[in-house]
Image (cartoon, grey):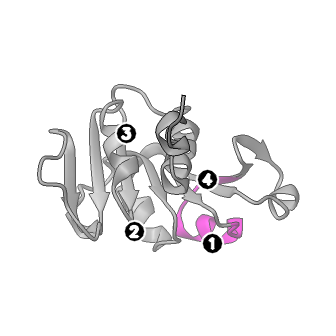
Amino acid sequence: MQGNLSTLAPRLPDRRQAETARKFRFLLRVFTPRTVFMEIGPSDCELSIRAASYVERVWCIDAPRRLSQPPCNLRWDAMGGVPLQSIDVAFSERFADPEDVCRLLAPGGVWFVYGELLPAQVFREAGFARVQYFAGALRVPGALARISRTTTTAAYK
């Protein structure tokens, strides 16, 4: 049987899809059907779209583009358009203004900053109660998070 190898082999997900799947699996630990999720500054909204099938509402903040037919529970807006104390779980790949995010989080809410090891003091000064660090999916002390390739900082209100 002769054939092109690309037609015989299954298609492998590209790097971006694999990274989105990794982030989503990480967030599943905090998602419930009643969760209100906010993604800040997404590059492609894929994480927000995936989350929309698991949570009550999704806010996609400062997205560069919008989908023509988004899920019915997905909203686009700027940071100032989100109701105060309405977000249970926030996620960003870049550090945003911690005071703004803290005001949007509901009591007990959490903000995950993916890919950055940030000092706990910055979050505490903004009003967060505690900060934890993750290396991949495991919670680790800050000293070990420094040597991880995939560090996530979690700030809890």
Query: What residue is shown at x 55% (from left), y 47% (from top)?
Result: 18
Within the magenta stretch, is there residue 46? no
Within the magenta stretch, is there residue 131? yes
List x then y, in percent, for residue 5: 55, 42
Label 1 is placed on what type of residue?
Val
Query: What residue is shown at x 19% (from left), y 51% (from top)?
Result: 75
Considering only order in the chain, which callout, 1 or 3, is on the residue closer to the N terminus?
3
Label 3 is placed on what type of residue?
Ala
Nearer to us: label 4 or label 1: 4
- In the rendered structure, find residue 100 and report the number of the disc placed on it: 2
Label 2 is placed on what type of residue?
Asp
Measured in 3D between alpha carbons, the distance from the residue under mark 3 to the one under mark 1, in whole angstroms, is 28 Å
Report the residue marked by disc 1: 122
Measured in 3D between alpha carbons, the distance from the residue under mark 2 to the one under mark 1, in whole angstroms, is 13 Å
Query: What residue is shown at x 31% (from left), y 31% (from top)?
Result: 53
Which image quadrant for residue 112? bottom right
- In the rendered structure, find residue 154 and report the number of the disc placed on it: 4
Label 4 is placed on what type of residue?
Ala
Report the residue marked by disc 3: 51
Left or right: where 92 falls relative to 36? right
Q: As rendered, which of 19 and 105 lies closer to the eye?
A: 19
Please state the extent of the stretch shown in magenta in the rendering. Answer: 117-132
Q: Can residue 94 be seen in this view?
A: yes
Circle 3: is it few (<14), some (14-19), or many (20+) Cα within 10 Å?
Answer: many
Helix, strand or loop at disc 1?
helix
Q: Do the residues labelled 2 and 1 touch (CB within 8 Å)?
A: no
Which image quadrant for residue 34? top left
Circle 1: is it few (<14), some (14-19), or many (20+) Cα within 10 Å?
Answer: some
Circle 2: is it few (<14), some (14-19), or many (20+) Cα within 10 Å?
Answer: few
Q: Are marks 4 and 3 in contact (CB under 8 Å)?
A: no
Helix, strand or loop at disc 4?
strand
